[in-house]
Image (cartoon, helix red, strand yellow):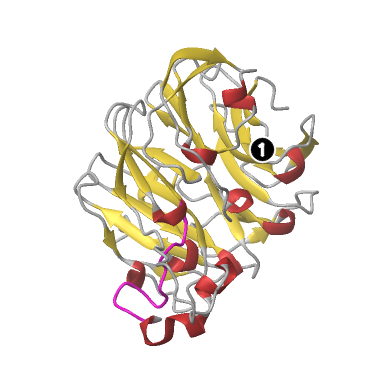
Amino acid sequence: MKYFFALGLMAIFSTAQADAVGADDPLLRGTIYVDIARAGDRVVAVGDRGHIVYSDDEGKTWRQGETPTRVLLTSVCFSDAQHGWAVGHDAVVLGTRDGGQTWAKQYSDEIIVDAMDDDDEYYDDDDYYDDDLYGDDLFGDAGPIDTSGAPLLDVWCDTPDRAVAVGGYGYLVETTDGGDSWERLSGRLPDDEGWHLYAIAPLDGEPNTLIIAGERGTLFRSRDRGQEWERLESPYHGTFFGITSSDSRTLLVHGLQGNVWLSRDRGDSWQRVSSGVRSGVNDGAVLADGTIVLVGNAGAMLTSRDQGAMLSLRFLSGRQTVSAVLARKGGGVIIAGAGGLRVLEDVR
């Protein structure tokens, strides 16, 4: 769910805001938000300039959390009402133990560029990932590619002690002690190419089975909560941005150029689902009545009431890109993206 905002925005520090603000406040409508998650009865959203906001009334009003970073945050996950993680650029990981009100930096992998001598050659940002710059350090114990400075793009958590984050160039890190320490485990994946990993998610109702999706049709599956991974045969060789699961066997993977693919057997086989769009499909949610809602670029919203076999398309007013969607209690959804945060009570 993170492609649209994966490649670098400059930022400033976030500051706490004590008073709740409504949906039209610049904090919400003037900021890009990239992901949303539920922390018990609370909703938490993360995005540009290190912003984290939370709502205790299903998106009607919001308060701003205290964050120690200025980087773009791309994903957020909560294991319960209090314990959660947010990840973003420079492989930054933030942790919270109070439901998203305050956050502490637990991990980062920022590139530090020393002052150059007159004889040093200048490299721009695109050169940081050129193989020639890494030389003998390209292959190492942490994985096949030096991922320094790469963004983390998604995070999954299942207990207050354990979370796994994935990102650019095959980046994978894990904590098993609540974030006190993080271990790089990119070498655990059967991924010598180091393609970007955009999403990690469990099958609904089967938390032991995890799926990772990413660049060049990358698909991995773990049947033991991420201890061992196998590569799945991919039906598509473009980029997947998101994973949406509606039951213990059914999942959708979606990404570039309107590609949506459906599996009824945990990823062993796939069939293409017509989306009606040629732009990216970024994220999805499953409502209480089983309706699947997918969102994407240009304000595309796709809905399915038959477990993903058919999709109905409409475009949101303004056609701004939507990067994330979350089901609301009581009906409707909250969406995040280029237009900030919005509540949609009608998803037909």
User: Quadrant of residue 214 in the image?
Assistant: bottom right
Viewed as shown, does residue 134 lie left or right of 309? left
Viewed as shown, does residue 104 lie left or right of 169? left
Asked whether 300 or 267 is in front, the reply is: 300
Prevailing secondary structure of the magenta residues: loop
| Image position, residue 101 (x, y; %) | 35, 25
Residue found at x 47% / y 52%: 89
For numbered disc 1, what is the local secondary structure? loop
| Image position, residue 225 (x, y; %) | 32, 55
How packed is label 1: few (under 14 Cα within 10 Å), some, or many (20 or more)?
A: many
Q: Is residue 149 magenta?
A: yes
Asked whether 294 or 140 is in front, the reply is: 140
Kindly identify the amino acid type of the residue bearing the numbered disc 1: Ala
Could one spot residue 267 in this view of the protein? no
The residue labelled by disc 1 is 338
Q: Which residues are magenta?
A: 139-153
